[in-house]
Image (tube, coloured by chain):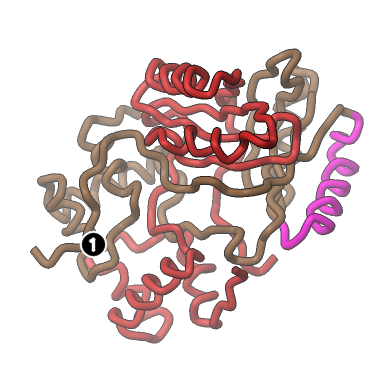
Amino acid sequence: MSADLSSLEEKILNDYQRDFPLEPRPYDRIAGCVGITEEELLETLGNLQNRNVVSRVGAVVKPQTVGASTLAAMKVPKNRLREVAEIVNSFEAVNHNYEREHSLNLWFVVTAPDEQGVKDVLKEIENQTGLKVIDLPLVTSFHIDLGFDLKW
Amino acid sequence: MVIDGTDERLLGALADGLPLCPRPYDEVGRWLGLSEGQVLSRLRRLISTGVVKRFGVIVRHRELGYRANAMVVWDVPDQLLPGLAHKAIQFDCVTLCYERPRRQPDWPYNLFCMIHGKDRKTVRRQLDRLNRQTGLQDCPHDILFSGQCFKQKGARYHAAPELKCGAA
């Protein structure tokens, strides 16, 4: 589905990916800025969420400041891709899981309270799938994520 | 900075998103046994100290029509990596940039950039420019476009309570 955004939706998405109002009634503040009521704004955001355009209003946490995480990759035979992806998905610690076009074709992020927790999940995925998991933990992050510019 | 257990619980509570109700911070506070003011001051501190890089609406690129999502990787000499990474992040198309370890023989690359674009042609064009202007073209590289997305949600560092906007 490609999103047909109204100009109002586009403005909300462009302006509030960062610096979300930190005050008791943030949605009321945003509504005032874009010229609608708080109720209409909440409805618009709920609607964007139902259409899967918006994941959530939330915090992007700097890697390695809270808990531990890693990027992991697997070489999965094509005919097992869906089955293995489902096993990987079944772990609550997995938050992103993508197919990529490469011999290492399944890529996912594992997040846990500590490093041992991450290693345990990777080991368990290896056990349950019989496939090797390549562990690519972050060494350095060079980019501050400022959100996504809709005007590209 | 030091993050305490309450900060972790707060971030955990936000993993499913700030509730869509008139007093969302009050609602989150109720789940955690904090006042609205305490939730707000903790969030402000987490943001000002850089633990939270960004607080706001998190969009899904694909549904916005940015269907080509490429992970571009290079094998860069270790000592040149920070300089090249800093050049790469000057490009608007680069949304994330990381150093990660090589894992020979399976994985020879140590520099990772995410590039999002409307289509593959655009992404390849952006990558060509980036490669030429940074000097990264001389390093072995590969481009991994994403296929199916099997899962995408907020990171869960901690068990989160049920996140509903209750009438309570």
Quadrant of the image occupied by residue B80: top right
The total number of labels drawn is 1
What residue is shown with label 1?
Answer: B24
- Residue B72 percent coordinates (x, y): 74, 39
Q: What residue is at 48 percent from the left and 60 percent from the top? A: A17
Name the foreground residue: B62 vs B122.
B62
Q: Which tint was used for chain B?
A: brown
Left or right position of B8 against B76: left
- Residue B4 percent coordinates (x, y): 24, 30
Count residues near mark 1 (Cα–Cα under 10 Å), then give few for <14, some for 14-19, many for 20+.
some
Left or right position of B107 against A34: right
Asked if residue B132 is among those painted magenta in the image, a careful observer would answer yes
Q: Main secondary structure of the magenta part?
A: helix
**Quadrant in which the C terminus of chain B is drawn:** bottom left
- Residue B79 percent coordinates (x, y): 75, 18
- Residue furthest to the front in view is A79
Left or right position of B13 against A142: left
**Chain ID at mark 1:** B
Asked if residue B166 is among those painted magenta in the image, a careful observer would answer no
The residue stretch that appears in magenta: B117-138
Q: What residue is at 86 percent from the left and 41 percent from the top? A: B131
Q: What residue is at 66 percent from the left and 36 percent from the top? A: A79
Name the foreground residue: A5 vs A77.
A77
- Residue B76 percent coordinates (x, y): 79, 24
**Quadrant in which the N terminus of chain B is drawn:** top left
Quadrant of the image occupied by residue A7: bottom right
Q: What residue is at 27 percent from the left and 61 percent from the top? A: B19
Q: Is residue A17 above or below residue A108?
A: below
Q: Which chain is red?
A: A
Secondary structure under tag 1 reads helix
Q: Amino acid at mark 1?
A: Pro
